[in-house]
Image (cartoon, rainbow, N blue to C red):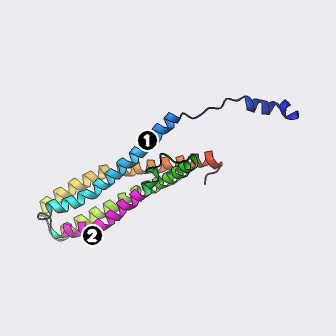
């Protein structure tokens, strides 16, 4: 009978239980899955561009450019395959149990952090690749000097705008996903692990 008289227990039992809005959770999940599929489509499209460029313009391209394209294509294929593999947790699990859903959600957030980290590092890699490309074009005298300078100036201008924006975007995504992972772990386990 002493348990029935405990005011804290009585207060606890009188609290209203707020159930999650299943339709909102479902909508959010479908949005996440759609985003992941769009990212995969965009990654694959990015993979098609160099192949299409080689196919369509191989007669107009110089040997150095073709060699550089062919050298980095296997790396590009591996990169896209790895990114797609990291996105695997968000594909096809609409009928999973709650425990399985939470486990996959944790894995997908961890994968999203890895993808954002790869995106951050791809900024310097693409910049290095452009330096190698233009150094090779200059060394092999592919273009007359005035045309080379115009192309280099245009590329540097584009890189000066796009790469910092891409870096900021990837950095914010990495921070957001890290925060989501921390919050989910705190919610599930009461820890930051």
Query: Percent from the top left, x then y, of residue 120?
Result: 40, 56
Residue position marked by numbered label 2 in the rendering: 71
Residue 58 image-quadrant placement: bottom left
Q: Which residue shows up at 36% across the image and 57% down it?
A: 123
Q: Which residue shows up at 21% across the image and 55% down it?
A: 153
In the rendered structure, the answer to whether residue 54 lies left or right of residue 71 reads left
Label ID, residue 30: 1
Q: Is disc 1 placed on a helix, strand or loop?
A: helix
Q: Between residues 84 and 137, which one lies in front from this camera angle?
A: 84
Query: Percent from the top left, x then y, of residue 87?
Result: 43, 54
How many residues crowd mark 2 within 10 Å: few (<14), some (14–19), many (20+)?
few
In the rendered structure, the answer to whether residue 46 lies left or right of residue 15 reads left
If you read the primary sequence from the N terminus, does the residue marked by circle 2 or circle 1 appear first? 1
Residue 77 image-quadrant placement: bottom left
Is label 2 in contact with label 1 (beta carbons under 8 Å)? no
Q: Which residue shows up at 50% across the image and 51% down it?
A: 109
Q: Is disc 2 placed on a helix, strand or loop?
A: helix
In this picture, which residue range is highlighted in magenta?
64-85
- Secondary structure predominantly adopted by residues drawn in magenta: helix
Label ID, residue 44: none
Residue 166 magenta: no
Query: Percent from the top left, x then y, of residue 110?
Result: 50, 54
Nearer to us of marks 2 and 1 is 1
């Amino acid at each position: 009978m002493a348990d029935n008289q405990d005011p804290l227990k009585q207060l606890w039992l009188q609290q209203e239980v707020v159930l999650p809005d299943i339709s909102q959770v479902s909508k959010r999940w479908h949005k996440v899955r759609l985003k992941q599929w769009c990212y995969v489509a965009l990654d694959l499209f990015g993979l098609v561009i160099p192949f299409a460029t080689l196919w369509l313009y191989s007669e107009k391209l110089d040997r150095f450019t073709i060699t550089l394209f062919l050298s980095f294509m296997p790396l590009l294929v591996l990169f896209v395959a790895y990114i797609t593999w990291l996105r695997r947790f968000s594909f096809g699990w609409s009928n999973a149990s709650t425990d399985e859903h939470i486990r996959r959600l944790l894995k997908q957030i961890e994968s999203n952090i890895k993808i954002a980290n790869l995106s951050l590092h791809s900024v310097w890699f693409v910049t290095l690749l452009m330096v190698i490309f233009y150094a090779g074009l200059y060394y092999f005298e592919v273009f007359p000097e005035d045309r080379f300078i115009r192309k280099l100036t245009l590329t540097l201008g584009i890189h000066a705008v796009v790469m910092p924006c891409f870096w900021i975007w990837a950095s914010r995504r990495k921070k957001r996903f890290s925060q989501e992972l921390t919050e989910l772990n705190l919610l599930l386990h009461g820890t930051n692990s």
